[in-house]
Amino acid sequence: MPLYRAEAVVLRTHKLGEADRIITLLTRDHGRVRAVAKGVRRTTSRWGSRLEPFSYVDLQLAEGRNLDVITQAETIAPFGSRLGADYERYTAGTAMLETAERVVTEDREPALQQFLLLVGGLRALTSDDKPALQVLDSFLLRSLSVAGYAPSFDGCARCGVEGPHRWFHPAAGGVLCPACRLPGSANPSAETVALLGALLTGDWGVVLASEVRHRREANGLVAAYLSWHLERGLRSLAYIER
């Protein structure tokens, strides 16, 4: 079988047979890949711990008919060991992994931007200088943008009239002017809209200066926007203390 190398983040694993696992990966050059890791559930496995969710690894794989086979694994960054001791950061990271798997809809579809975004998001989560929920919200907005669902927080999402605007509707794609306002639109504060824009662009000066009440309001709007465009919510969001 032809061999190839890949940098990857482990998104998910599940058991196969008595000793194997199927590993779902997001790779730098090959998009989403599903591969078999043989014997990793045995206590004698040399590299089973390197193929747990959150692991950023350098792999050698053999191409297979249905599933590739992992033949080597070296750790680049053990994000999981750093996140495991902090419930808030761990659950935020779990939501990142689930989002990455959902937005990359086809196996082997090129997804370099999503890969770099995920690695950057996990690296930010393992630092202590940014709050976990805001790192997650920033990642979710950026991931949706890369996938083609970029929200508008400046101009009206329907007519393009420059804001600031105070109405928000997930189905419309962001904020709306009074003339384009849809039934059921949320009415966030001006500070929350500014915070959403900062989360999307990565303006951490604005994010870190924001008040808790505006962060909470932004959390809810990001979750609603994500659920609309992914057609169903993330299972992992239920475990996040918002």
Image (tube, grey):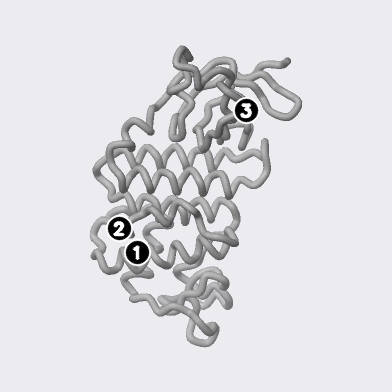
Amino acid type assigned to the residue bearing label 3 in the image: Ala
Q: Which amino acid does the dot numbered 2 rest on? A: Val
x 29%, y 59%: residue: 206
How far apart marks 1 and 2 lie (CA) works out to 6 Å
Callout 2: 10 Å neighbours few (<14), some, many (20+)? many
Q: Residue at x 31, y 71 (%)?
A: 191
Q: Secondary structure at mark 3?
A: strand
Residue 106 seen in this snapshot: yes
* Quarter of the image that includes the N terminus: top right
Q: CA distance from mark 3 to mark 1?
A: 40 Å
Residue 185, compared with residue 33, is above or below; it is below
Q: Nearer the N terminus, badge 1 or badge 2?
A: 1
Secondary structure at badge 2 equals: helix
Q: Is residue 27 something that shows in the picture? A: no
Sequence-first tag of 3 and 1: 3
Residue 75 x, y percent position in the rendering: 43, 21
Residue carrying label 2: 207
Residue found farthest to the bottom: 179
Q: Which residue is mark 3?
A: 35
Q: Residue 235, image x and y in percent?
A: 49, 53
Residue in front for this viewpoint, 17 or 145: 17
User: Can you name the residue that lies furthest to the right here?
Assistant: 65
Which residue is identified by label 1? Answer: 195
* Residue 95 at x, y percent in the picture: 45, 48
Relative horizontal placement of residue 82, taking residue 104 as reference (left or right): left
Asked if disc 1 and disc 2 are in contact, CB closer than 8 Å, the reply is: yes
Q: Amino acid at mark 1?
A: Leu
